[in-house]
Image: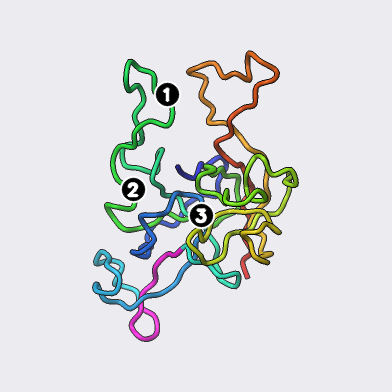
Amino acid sequence: MALKLLQPGTQPLGQFDGKDAEVLTLKGGEIVTFTSVLATAATDAAAADSFDGYVYQAKRVVVTRTVATSDRPLMLADDGIAGYGTLFGTVVGGTVGQVSTGGTVLGPHTATGSGKVTLWEKPGLYAVSLDACDTTFADGLVPTNTTLATGAGLTFVPASASGGQLTPVGSTAAAGNTVVVGRFVDFETNGSLVNTPNRLVSSLATPTYSFAVFYFNPPSA
């Protein structure tokens, strides 16, 4: 789905090109950083303005979710493949008006038109959809993790197929990564009251959580 901006820092960064191999796989809410590639269209395609800046050996800057524990700065990606992470969102209505959430995705990934990634690097309160978190392991950022408490430190999955995904410090996916980028607050539902949730009519019902709320405050050095 996507990153939700609750009380974010102001003025996101939006001028940086995403790494071609990764940019359209961003779900939103992953930890990302800067890296560099050779400044040729054959190496990594980009719009003309992305070729204005260079570093040593004629390289240019791109955004990547293949993040090492020593990389800085650490930022949140604000693009995705569902919800407002796509150009036209998702269908509401559907067959006889029964679809209120989780409908068919309309339009491409938000980065498709520009190849750029919107970045949030300032401290603030955010929420990320659980499909963009580390849900591979029971000790990941999942509602069933019995060891996860409010205020727990959150880090990210190091460079891998699920690189950049938020996960608790000490989780299996963190693999020794102790870099704290934020603090867990709670899990929340999608907020929809179109259909009365079971939890409002039955004390035994278990709510379905869709987002993890966290305070983002990455290290600067």
Please state which amino acid type lies under the numbered disc 3.
Answer: Glu
Does the magenta portion include 63? yes
| Residue furthest to the bottom | 57
Q: Amino acid at mark 1?
A: Ser
* Depth check, front residue: 174 or 136: 136
User: Where does the image place residue 200, in percent across and percent down from the top left?
Assistant: 63, 16
* Mark 2, residue position: 109
The residue beneath circle 3 is 30
Residue 11 is left or right of residue 81, and the answer is: right
Label 1 Cα neighbours within 10 Å, binned few <14 / some 14-19 / many ≥20: some
The image quadrant where one finds the N terminus is: top left
The segment highlighted magenta reads: 54-64
- Residues 63 and 121: in front is 63
Could you tell me residue 61's position as x and y percent? 39, 71
Residue 171 location, x and y as percent? 67, 57
The residue labelled by disc 1 is 100
Question: What residue lies at 34% left-to-right and 74% top-to-bottom?
Answer: 53
Residue 78 picture location, percent across and down: 45, 50
* Residue 2 is covered by the magenta coloring: no
Q: Quadrant of residue 218?
A: bottom right
